[in-house]
Structures are given as structure tokens and as C-alpha cells.
Image (cartoon, rainbow, N blue to C red):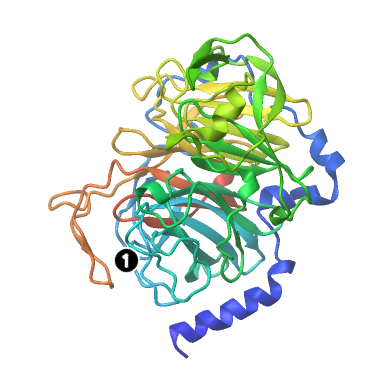
Amino acid sequence: MSKFDDHIDLMRDLAKNAENMDPHWTYSRRNFLKSGVAAAAMVGMPFALGSKAAHAARLPYSPDYGPLMPVNDEVTGLPLLQLPEGFKYWSYGWTGDLMNDGVATPGAHDGMAVVAADANRIVLVRNHEQGSSTSGHYMPGSKGIYDPRCNGGTTTLVFAPQQKKWLSSWASLSGLIRPCAGGPTPWNTWLSCEETSNGLHNGASKQHGYVFEVPASGIASGQPLIDMGCFSHEAAAVDPVTGMIYETEDSTPSGLYRFVPNVPGRLSAGGKLQMMKLKTANNASIAIEGQNYGYFDTALENAIGTTWDVEWVDIENPDKPFISGTTYGGVRSQGLVQGASSLRRGEGIWYGNGVIYVCSTSGGAANNGQIFAYDPRRETFTLLFVSMGDGIDGVDSPDNIAWSPRGSLILCEDGGASPQQLRGLTLDGTIFPFCATNMDFRVGGTIGPVTRPSGRTFNNNALGNEWAGATFHNEWLFANAYGAPGITFAITGPWDNGAL
């Protein structure tokens, strides 16, 4: 039987059984979907708010898992990553590798999550933040295409945890511009978010800046969810108790948005978009169409443990990408004129422990990152962590974030440090390095040039390429190396020894 035949059999089986597979573990754990009361009871902050440990001194090793050292990949035998002792990993889906549907794996591996799983299979959807509006889509057929001129989109991957083996991958959505991150849902789908408001005025055949939904099996419809807004999206997180979806915006200033669906779990039925407003005095202002408006900029507040009360203002026209002409910011300006609050480059967002964790990549005094927690039951927004810069606490502009099975956060770095790392943020606010890229493919580098079965050769220095798409499922951590080459990793090891 051919590789393609195996792929078709797998697709049919997934289509038949996907509804019986669990969603992302953060939603299925302790039957969250069946008990809103249980979820609402678990809203205690897992960080020691106000603790000086949130400004942890830079450590040369992980306090939980030990020092990082080069570890050989179980697939290629190459020392692609540095990890603590006892951890192993399996690489997959290098840029250019042929997938099971015959399509070459796109580049720019970005946001990702587990969207369905059972004992034998873990299904992930992975974004590819490609931004061309002239290169054309990469779908093998006519389905799953939004704008045929554009080359961003998603691929779907299947991993067998018992066999420690990657089974399949295929193109599941294309025709997007810069689908950066997104988020998993409790109903076994992935929300892919475009980080742009480009459109007809700069080469595309349609307006962009939307959210798209991708199923765990098969191919997406390719239809945008208009009511979720048209802006420079970054990521999304679902509150399983209410079905509301929280969205970040990668710009400065940027809004934190709440989408209230008309029918929870059925986003195509539309809903209302709102922007967060903190109940505090304004500390910044912005000119919009010749008039100044005051707002609160969270990046200027640096006291760990500060908590604000939250209210929400309605966005009357979520499908307004421009203030006027082609001046971007039409959605957030509707909130700012009502006094809504701002993040500086709102990026990663994740649901866990009844809390929505939010990352401001350029927030804080050093412009190097902040982590907040929004409590949807108490309607509060709390500053949990502020990065003081790579030379002090080691955190270099956190981007994608994810909640771990042990209740800590993992942060994907997206800054200028080399090598870029995955960082753990523990329950008491301590930061530690967990994984670093070891990929220098230059002649004389840590690895040297590598030629893949596709015939593509990589001979660049990839030590400074960002991390993206970290997502846990039980004893597995999946994550992406973003740049050339884009690679997806499945990592496992002695998790019980530490905080992740």
C-alpha cells in the first residue's frame, strides 16, 4: 500500500471517529465541558502575586530539570536541540518535505495546538505564517482555499504516542496572509488567525485579517469568521464554561478582544465583538482622525501583582479594517475612542485553570514582555510577570504561550538572543530555560549543512530563529522552530521531576 493510500485510510478513519476523540486536554480534563461549576471553582491564581520571584535572577540551568545539553534527534540522529537530561524528541515536517497528500510542507511554522486525541493518535493543526499575496495557495485541490493568490495557511499532523512515531500530515487550509497563531477549541477544531489587515490595495484578491476554523479531520471550509473581527490577529483562547473566545492583536496599541458567540460552539452563526476596558485612570492618549482620546496602556504599569477590574465595550463594526482609506486600525480605534485599554503587541493567549493567560510581547519597562491573567469569573486582569531583558532574567520577548499539565506556563521566545529558547514560568513566578535550539547548519557550525530527502539543503545559522506553537498533551510537548528550516518537534521525558 502506498503512502498516499495510508493517508486516505487515516483521513477516513479520523472523519468517522473524530467526534469521539477528546479535544485539547485543558478542555477535557476533569470534565470541564460537563461542569461549569468545577471550572469556575478553579480560578485561584497559580502565581504568587507580588512575589519578587517574578523578577527571577538569570539562571544558567533549569532549577527543575537540570542543565541543557545537546541531544540527538530520534529521527535524524542530529543534535538539533539542547534539553535537560532524560528528554528525547522526534522531528517532523521540515520545510519542503513532502506531506502524505503530495504537497511540500510550507515554511514559517508558527502557532499550533492539539485539537483531538485518543490513546493511539494525537491530531495537531499547525499554522504557516507565509505572507505572499502573489505566490498562490498550496492546496492540492479546490477545497479549503480563501484567496487563491496567497500562500499562508495550515497543515494537519497526526502523531502516534504509543509508537513514538509521526503518522501523517496534509494541507488543511490555504489562501491566507500571515496566519500567525490561533488556538484550540473544546469542540475539536483550531482557530487560525491572520496577522494582517492587507487586502485588495496591496495585491490580494480579497480583504484579509480574519479568523478561520479548521477541523481535526479533513479540510477547512476556507470561509472567514467575519464577526470575530478584521484586524492584525495573533492568537485566540476559548473559555469552555461560556464558549466566549478571547483574541489578541499584534500591534501597538492593540486590543484584547472578547467574542460572544450567538451559539456557543457554532462560530459561523456570528456573535458580538468587544474590547477590554480596565477601570483605572488613563495614562496615554492617541489621535484618531484629528481628535485625541485617552486610554490606559498596560505596558506602562510595572508593579507585579497589580490587579484591575474589567469591563467591555462593544465594537459596532468588527469588519472595519481601516480607520479611513488604507490607514490600519479600524477595529481597535472603535474601542479606543470609548476608553478601552491597550497592550503592546498582544500575542500569546491560552486558557488554563479557569484563567485566560495573555502575553504582551513588547510590554514592560524593558519592552521585553509581560504576562497577564484575566479571570473571566471575577472580571479582573492581573500582571503576573515582567521580563527585565535577556541580560537580567533571560526572557527574550515571549510570543506564543501554553499552559502545561502541571499548571505552569511555557513561553516561546521571539527576540534577538541566540540561541532562542523555550522558557518555563513556574507557579511561584520563577523563570527557567527548558529547551534551546542547537541548529547551526553552516559549514563548521554545530551541525553543518543538511540535505533533506526533498533535495533541499539547509546551510544557514538557525540558532536565532524563534520558537512557536508550543502545546502540551499529557506527557508530550509539541513545538515549532519557525524559520529556515521550519521543523516540528515532539518532546517527552521525566516531566515529574519539575514544573512543566
**Depth order, front residue of 166/10:** 10
**Can residue 346 be seen?**
yes
Identify the residue position indicated by label 1 in the image. Answer: 96
Q: Secondary structure at mark 1?
A: loop
- Residue displayed at 36% across by 25% down: 390
Q: Does residue 19 lie above or below 109 as drawn? A: below
**Depth order, front residue of 223/415:** 223
Q: Which residue type does callout 1 highlight? A: Gly
240 displayed left or right of 285: right
User: Where in the figure is residue 404, as x and y percent of width and height?
Assistant: 60, 42
**Which residue reaches farthest bottom?**
1
315 displayed left or right of 200: right
- Residue displayed at 64% across by 21% down: 338
User: Where in the figure is residue 406, as x and y percent of width and height?
Assistant: 63, 41
**Can residue 404 be seen?**
no
User: Where in the figure is residue 409, as x and y percent of width and height?
Assistant: 56, 36
**Depth order, front residue of 458/283:** 283
Label 1 CA crowd tier, 10 Å (few <14, some 14–19, many 20+): some
181 displayed left or right of 453: right
User: Where in the figure is residue 11, as x and y percent of width and height?
Assistant: 58, 77
199 displayed left or right of 452: right
**Depth order, front residue of 348/270:** 270
Q: Does residue 88 lie above or below 290 as drawn? A: below
